[in-house]
Image: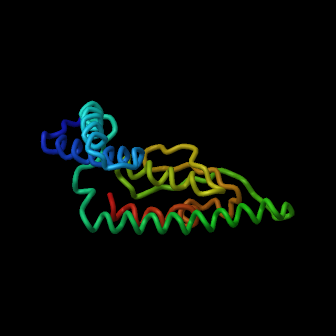
Amino acid sequence: MQTISFSDKLQRFILNWFFLMLVWIMFTSTFAVQEVVIGAIVTMFISLMSISMFTCCTLKLLSPVRIFWMLYYFVVFLIALVKANLDVARRVLSPSLPINPGVVKFKTKLTTNYSKMVLANSITLTPGTLTIDVIDDTFYIHWIDVTTTDPEKAFTEIAESFEKVLLKIF
């Protein structure tokens, strides 16, 4: 089991607390003193209790360069989402269009479990694809219209645009 230094634990706590406070403020929609104080106490307690379970990253994640790449990833994801939605809508509205469902696999260069989880969720959230399993660095994807069974070509069509940006973030 990996030992986590005090500095990393502190950074994880601060990062977790920061994001939980953002969620608290979004849900309460107010900056009233009593709401912020209660939110700070509640989110601090949750952050302390969940340091080892839910936090994967340290404060390095909040560097300006990484924040830029996160915003860029959001744009890349939105573009892929719109394209996939239009493709699936076209298939639904024109039932004569052929589909060729199947499972493809490919390998990723991502190394952290968190980055693999983000990639898997991005693939699943894009209509027409569904992440079935991730084993080590191999992804198994159900694809609504398999155009190739070659792992490298499948990777290029399904996940390459996501992975390029994720490699810069994580």
Is residue 67 visible in this depiction of the protein?
yes
**In front of the other: 57 or 45:** 45
- The percent coordinates of residue 119 (x first, y second) are 47, 54
Residue furthest out toward the right: 96
Badge count = 0
Would you place residue 139 above or below residue 163 in this image? above
Query: What colour-coding does the image apply?
Result: rainbow
- Residue that appears at 19% across and 40% down: 9
**In front of the other: 16 or 35:** 35
Picture quarter with the N terminus? top left
Dividing the picture into quadrants, the one containing residue 42 is top left
Relative to 96, 166 lies left or right: left
**In front of the other: 18 or 74:** 18
Is residue 52 visible in this depiction of the protein?
no
Dividing the picture into quadrants, the one containing residue 44 is top left
Would you place residue 138 above or below residue 169 in this image? above
**In front of the other: 164 or 16:** 16
- The percent coordinates of residue 89 (x first, y second) are 74, 62
- The percent coordinates of residue 46 (x first, y second) are 30, 33
- Residue that appears at 57% across and 51% down: 124
Relative to 16, 28 lies left or right: right
Residue furthest out toward the left: 6
Would you place residue 121 above or below residue 6 in this image? below
- Residue that appears at 71% across and 61% down: 88
Relative to 139, 145 lies left or right: right
Picture quarter with the C terminus? bottom left
- Residue that appears at 23% across and 50% down: 58
